Image (cartoon, rainbow, N blue to C red):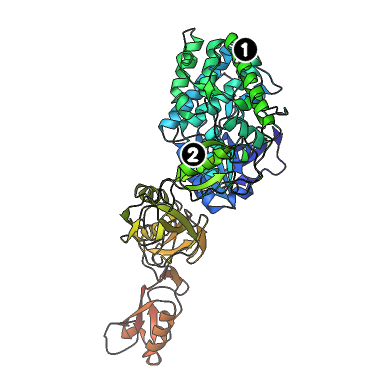
């Protein structure tokens, strides 16, 4: 760790002290939690991510989901927040090292130690998957080993937030670490827990073989091999690897998710069987791993560790049977060589090339296949897609029509399955949280688009709550229609309402309606205009713009203030009344004893109950004695 030059304080609570690491999406610091007086790990997202409001919202939800994961092998998330446009998450500070450090320099671990370290990782992933969280970025850098030997997994949720369909790193890209991609992740299709199983298989492969299964001169080359290449058995690089452990690795690295361990818990169970010397189930399964792409030469470079954007891979996968031992490996190698020689001979005899890919879009798939095969092309995968074209019609091809292509190349067809829609009543999502609104629209088989606004309606609005939608709820539409939902953008500032004269209960309700809270710190001061116990002022003041969640301090009235009593002796009734009124006081008159009055004092004040210069409460009454033969007592406002 290196000390930081500027120990910045985030959210008035977390003070960074040392830089721990730089990652593909964030920088990790050691920080001190000033409130709880404990060290924490502070992961601060790069500015280019923090600038996207849609990512920030998804990041908030993923951070909340990760914070709900409570497992001995998962690094707990304590908090998340924003400080001056910078978003961060707060995690437990782990005293130890990462698996990436242990493997640096192509080092290997013993088979037994590798299985012992990976088993708790599989347990953590299994727990997360059961709670609806897919990691998406399992790699040695995200596996930590504490000083007392415990294994912990970190960074749940960030890759999910970045890789959401609304926030790809760029068009046609997927976020992650190419070395540890699953094939479906490289292709940009939907993933589940089995994708994490594949990535964990890559990690285990690297631990025992000293290198990952695929290396190349770029992330694109590596991710392409995950989709198209065959996995060389780890014993090819380390002949001391037990057959049972190799079987576990190859089971996890099946190209098709249906041929892998179906859960991380299944993989963990096999790892435990291996460490206990029992037969593993992977040895009895019939998974396929090999394909002709393995004969392709690729320059060797050090595998990348950073999470990054990689173009999506397309094309067919190649799955054939797994080698069981050295003898079958030799046979398989001979077969591959014979096939390669046969393919080369076939290629040499084909002296005619197709200069352009034929345009078969709009044709029925059977007609298109016949034409392409007649041109010497090989039909690969056919994918069904929704389209307004009739069912069974070719929508597009890969390579595209007009592209340069040679005989023997593989063509992928996208075939229309028709436009299958049904009438649906658009649900009303106004007032729902963004997450609930998304779930409601998905259940109705509707698409949605999130629109952010900084304009607060007159009726108020909560952050992360749907303000309006188009089309409106209740109208009829078709499944697949897009509903635009409008919510307040993260960081929207709200004006503090005018709460003067409100009770504290009324003030709390009014603040809650605009996403603000009442500060636990309260104060009071005297007031000559606001009754005791009512809100006199707020800090910040009424109309000030503050962010959602800001705690507003209420200042309540403690009652009337004290005022200075003026001198009114010697004044007439009208003058005395006016002088007291100027100070907010009332005058009460009584006739003075004539024995104390001289003829010149008739009609003037000769005594007052509150001495001049003394202080009394505003609106108090001062008793005045006036020389007057009438003898009446009056109170003058």
- Compared to 9, does 225 lie above or below? above
Residue 188 visible: no
Q: Residue at x 46, y 41 (%)?
A: 366
- Residue 549, given in percent of the width and then of the height, sits at 47, 53
Q: Quadrant of residue 34?
A: top right
Marks 1,2: beta carbons within 8 A: no
Disc ID at residue 622: none
Q: In front: 574, or 318? A: 318
Which mark sits nearer the N-terminus, 1 or 2? 1
Q: In front: 586, or 521? A: 521
- Compared to 440, does 155 lie above or below? above
Disc ID at residue 330: 1
Report the Cα–Cα distance between label 1 and label 2: 33 Å
Q: Secondary structure at mark 1?
A: helix
Residue 51 visible: yes
Q: Residue at x 65, y 13 (%)?
A: 238
- Residue 466, given in percent of the width and then of the height, sits at 40, 57
Please state the total of marks drawn on the protein image. Answer: 2
- The N terminus lies in quadrant: top right
**Which residue in the protein does label 2 denote?**
382
Tell me: 572 left or right of 330: left
């Amino acid at each position: 760790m290196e000390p930081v030059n500027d120990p910045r304080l985030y959210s008035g609570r977390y003070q960074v002290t040392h830089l721990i690491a730089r990652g593909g999406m964030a920088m990790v610091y050691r920080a001190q939690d000033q409130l709880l007086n404990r060290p924490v790990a502070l992961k601060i997202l790069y500015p280019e991510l923090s600038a996207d409001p849609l990512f920030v919202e998804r990041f908030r939800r993923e951070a909340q989901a990760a914070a709900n994961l409570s497992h001995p092998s998962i690094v707990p998330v304590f908090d998340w927040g924003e400080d001056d446009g910078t978003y961060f998450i707060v995690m437990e500070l782990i005293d130890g090292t990462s698996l990436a450090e242990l493997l640096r320099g192509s080092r290997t671990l013993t088979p037994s130690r590798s299985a012992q370290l990976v088993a708790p990782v599989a347990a953590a992933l299994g727990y997360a998957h059961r709670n609806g969280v897919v990691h998406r970025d399992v790699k040695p850098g995200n596996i930590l080993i504490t000083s007392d030997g415990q294994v912990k997994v970190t960074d749940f949720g960030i890759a999910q937030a970045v890789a959401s369909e609304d926030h790809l790193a760029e068009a046609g890209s997927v976020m992650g670490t190419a070395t540890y991609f699953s094939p479906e992740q490289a292709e940009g299709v939907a993933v589940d827990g089995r994708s994490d199983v594949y990535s964990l298989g890559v990690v285990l492969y690297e631990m025992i073989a000293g290198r990952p299964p695929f290396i190349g001169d770029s992330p694109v080359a590596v991710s392409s091999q995950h989709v198209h290449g065959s996995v060389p058995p780890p014993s090819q690089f380390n002949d001391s690897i037990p057959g049972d452990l190799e079987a576990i690795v190859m089971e996890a690295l099946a190209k098709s998710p249906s041929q892998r361990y179906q859960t991380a818990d299944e993989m963990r169970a096999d790892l435990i069987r291996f460490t206990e010397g029992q037969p593993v189930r992977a040895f009895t399964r019939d998974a396929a791993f090999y394909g002709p792409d393995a004969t392709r030469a690729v320059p060797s470079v050090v595998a990348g560790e950073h999470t990054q954007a990689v173009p999506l891979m397309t094309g067919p996968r190649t799955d054939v049977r797994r080698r069981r031992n050295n003898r079958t490996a030799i046979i398989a190698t001979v077969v591959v060589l014979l096939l390669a020689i046969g393919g080369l001979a076939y290629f040499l005899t084909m002296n005619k090339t197709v200069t352009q890919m034929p345009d078969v879009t709009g044709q029925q798939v059977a007609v298109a296949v016949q034409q392409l095969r007649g041109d010497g092309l090989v039909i690969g995968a056919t994918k069904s897609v929704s389209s307004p074209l009739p069912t069974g019609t070719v929508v597009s091809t890969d390579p595209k029509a007009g592209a340069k292509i040679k005989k023997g190349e593989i063509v992928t067809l996208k075939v229309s399955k028709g436009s299958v829609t049904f009438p649906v009543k658009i649900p009303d999502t106004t007032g729902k949280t963004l997450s609930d609104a998304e779930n409601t629209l998905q259940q109705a088989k509707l698409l949605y688009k999130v629109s952010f606004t900084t304009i607060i309606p007159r009726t108020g609005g909560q952050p992360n709550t749907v303000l309006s939608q188009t089309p409106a709820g209740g109208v009829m539409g078709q499944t697949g229609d897009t509903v635009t939902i409008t919510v307040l953008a993260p960081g929207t500032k709200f004006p503090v309402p005018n709460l003067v004269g409100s009770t504290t209960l009324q003030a709390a309700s009014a603040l809650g309606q605009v996403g603000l809270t009442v500060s636990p710190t309260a104060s009071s001061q005297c007031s000559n205009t606001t009754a005791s116990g009512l809100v006199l002022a707020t800090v910040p003041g009424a109309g000030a713009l503050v962010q959602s969640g800001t705690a507003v301090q209420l200042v309540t009235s403690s009652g009337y203030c004290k005022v200075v009593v003026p001198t009114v002796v010697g004044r007439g009734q009208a003058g005395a009344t006016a002088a007291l009124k100027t100070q907010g006081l009332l005058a009460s008159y009584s006739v003075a004893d004539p024995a104390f009055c001289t003829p010149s004092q008739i009609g003037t004040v000769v005594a007052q109950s509150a001495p001049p210069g003394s202080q009394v409460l505003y609106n108090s009454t001062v008793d005045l004695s006036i020389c007057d033969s009438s003898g009446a007592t009056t109170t003058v406002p």
